[in-house]
């Protein structure tokens, strides 16, 4: 019997002993007079138990059977479900094992079986809340996560490059072997081909996105009075696409991207474990077919403004040329250029006025091809094979082999040679001195 039941019983006893009227008891209990009369009759017939609800302590008719509960606990106790939380466990029980149970029900099962324990609440560092952008495509956060994605099942070390829209949390990702410029440019191309050109990208201050000034140890950075350094290949590509690049000063500043990775390091890792993923190709297939569709359907929000801020790719914006490794070279007098240890010659038909000694744009495409652009046109190239120097056959030099650790023999038979003895040599030396 709860304290509320006891208070109710006290009021009913007062009304029964005529200490208060039934109307006063009804006002005290916040019930109608009719209900007070019913309770007084029940107390007279059944005693004090009348104030307790008749269904209290009775198992619900909608309770899941004990056999199903034991089966679910047995499944979640397996090694493949190690580390699953109640929310993810309830989803996989319904989709993989046809055991439909709410998140709270699974939470109680797992707590009772010792499979899950609530995390202690801690006070984290306070960061000022920033509202989302209003339109899809205004700001796209971009980063790479290094994690043991395959849990040691494969021999490859994978990196997950991700991009997430700030207004809607719509995301895109791809597993790569290394966090390189080419891999990030490929990720950017995937977003551009699917949605168009965003207004701005939000990244950290990694060397792929920003060229930093070198400073000595224990020396403060002085940004004033410094000439800006040339952009990185990614920075140059974004500039040519008219996409702004914003740099975050802390991981919390791009928290939406960090939370995407945090969720992926939990749900995606466990999903690939159950699917038996062992290679990068399988990981990307699972990411594209299973995880990202779930994320974009369950974890996204509606923007405040339904307008799409993405801009189409213009005809003059050649993605193959922009998203490549670009350098500048000077044309020599014989209309050749040197690039990455190779000599390229410009075909005679493309040679024009002002080309000799001019600076040209050299593009190394991601497919391995090389293109040269002078002003607004591309020049045809041919690889110039260098002549191999003739082999000079010199007489082989004879070298004595080592003595293999034996005793030196340069004094061998020295005393057997014809000549004066040591005493005679001394006498001769004294006589002639």
Image (cartoon, rainbow, N blue to C red):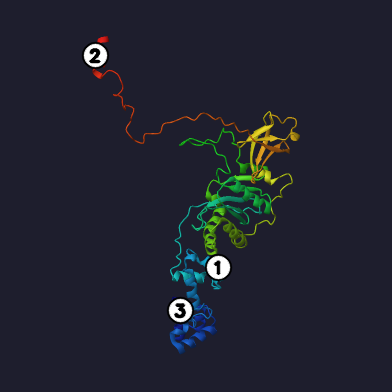
Tell how many labels.
3
Say which residue appears at 54% left-offset and 30% top-offset. Answer: 393
Q: Nearer the viewer, residue 123 or 232?
A: 232
Q: Is residue 396 above or below residue 293?
A: above
Indicate the secondary structure of the residue bearing disc 1.
helix
Q: Residue at x 54, y 45 (%)?
A: 249
Q: Is residue 433 visible?
A: no
Residue identified by numbered label 1: 91
Question: Disc 3 versus disc 1: distance between alpha carbons?
Answer: 39 Å
Image coordinates of residue 396 in percent, x first then y, are 49, 30
Quarter of the figure that contains the C terminus: top left
Labels 2 and 1: the sequence-earlier one: 1
The answer to whether 375 appears left or right of 415 in the picture is right
Q: Nearer the viewer, mark 3 or mark 1?
A: 1
Residue 209 position by quadrant: top right
Sooner in the amino-acid sequence: mark 3 or mark 1: 3
Between label 2 and label 1, give the one nearer the viewer: 2
Identity of the residue furthest to the bottom in this view = 45
Q: Residues within 10 Å of mark 3 (few under 14, many from 20)?
A: some
User: What x and y, as percent, mark residue 234?
Assistant: 61, 44
Label 2 – label 3 distance at C-alpha: 138 Å
Of the pair 239 and 423, the residue shown nearer to us: 423
Residue occupying image coordinates x 44% and y 76%? 3
> Mark 2 — residue?
427
Residue 5 - label: 3
* Front residue (pair 70, 378): 378
């Amino acid at each position: 019997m709860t304290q509320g039941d006891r208070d109710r019983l006290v009021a009913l006893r007062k009304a029964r002993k005529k200490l208060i009227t039934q109307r006063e008891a009804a006002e005290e209990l916040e019930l109608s007079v009719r209900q007070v009369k019913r309770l007084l009759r029940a107390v007279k017939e059944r005693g004090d138990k009348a104030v307790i609800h008749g269904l209290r302590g009775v198992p619900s008719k909608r309770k899941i059977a004990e056999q199903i509960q034991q089966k679910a606990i047995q499944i979640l106790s397996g090694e493949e479900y190690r580390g699953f939380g109640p929310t993810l466990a309830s989803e996989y029980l319904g989709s993989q094992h046809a055991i439909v149970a709410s998140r709270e029900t699974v939470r109680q099962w797992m707590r009772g079986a010792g499979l899950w324990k609530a995390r202690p609440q801690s006070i984290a560092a306070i960061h000022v809340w920033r509202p989302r952008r209003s339109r899809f495509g205004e700001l796209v956060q971009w980063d790479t996560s290094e994690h043991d994605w395959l849990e040691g099942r494969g021999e490859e070390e994978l990196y997950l490059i991700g991009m997430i829209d700030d207004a809607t949390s719509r995301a895109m990702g791809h597993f790569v072997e290394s966090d390189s410029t080419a891999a990030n440019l490929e990720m950017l191309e995937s977003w551009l081909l699917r949605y168009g050109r965003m207004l701005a990208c939000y990244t950290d201050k990694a060397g792929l996105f920003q060229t930093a000034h070198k400073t000595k140890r224990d020396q403060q950075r002085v940004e004033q009075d410094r000439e800006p350094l040339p952009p990185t290949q990614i920075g140059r590509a974004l500039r040519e696409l008219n996409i702004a690049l914003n740099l975050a000063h802390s991981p919390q500043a791009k928290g939406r991207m960090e939370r995407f990775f945090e969720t992926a390091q939990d749900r995606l890792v466990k999903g690939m474990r159950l699917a038996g993923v062992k290679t990068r190709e399988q990981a990307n297939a699972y990411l594209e077919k299973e995880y990202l569709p779930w994320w974009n359907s369950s974890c996204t929000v509606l923007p405040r403004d339904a307008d799409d801020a993405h801009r189409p790719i213009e005809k003059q914006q050649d993605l193959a040329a922009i998203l490549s490794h670009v350098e500048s070279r000077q044309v020599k007098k014989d209309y050749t250029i040197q690039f990455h240890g190779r000599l390229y010659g410009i075909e005679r038909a493309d040679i024009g006025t002002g080309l000799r000694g001019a600076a040209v744009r050299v593009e190394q495409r991601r497919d391995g091809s090389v293109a040269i652009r002078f002003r607004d046109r591309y020049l045809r190239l041919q690889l110039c094979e260098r002549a191999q120097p003739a082999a000079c056959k010199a007489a082989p030099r004879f070298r004595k082999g080592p003595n293999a650790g034996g005793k030196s023999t340069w004094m061998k038979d020295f005393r057997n040679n014809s000549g004066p003895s040591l005493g005679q040599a001394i006498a001769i030396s004294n006589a002639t001195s």
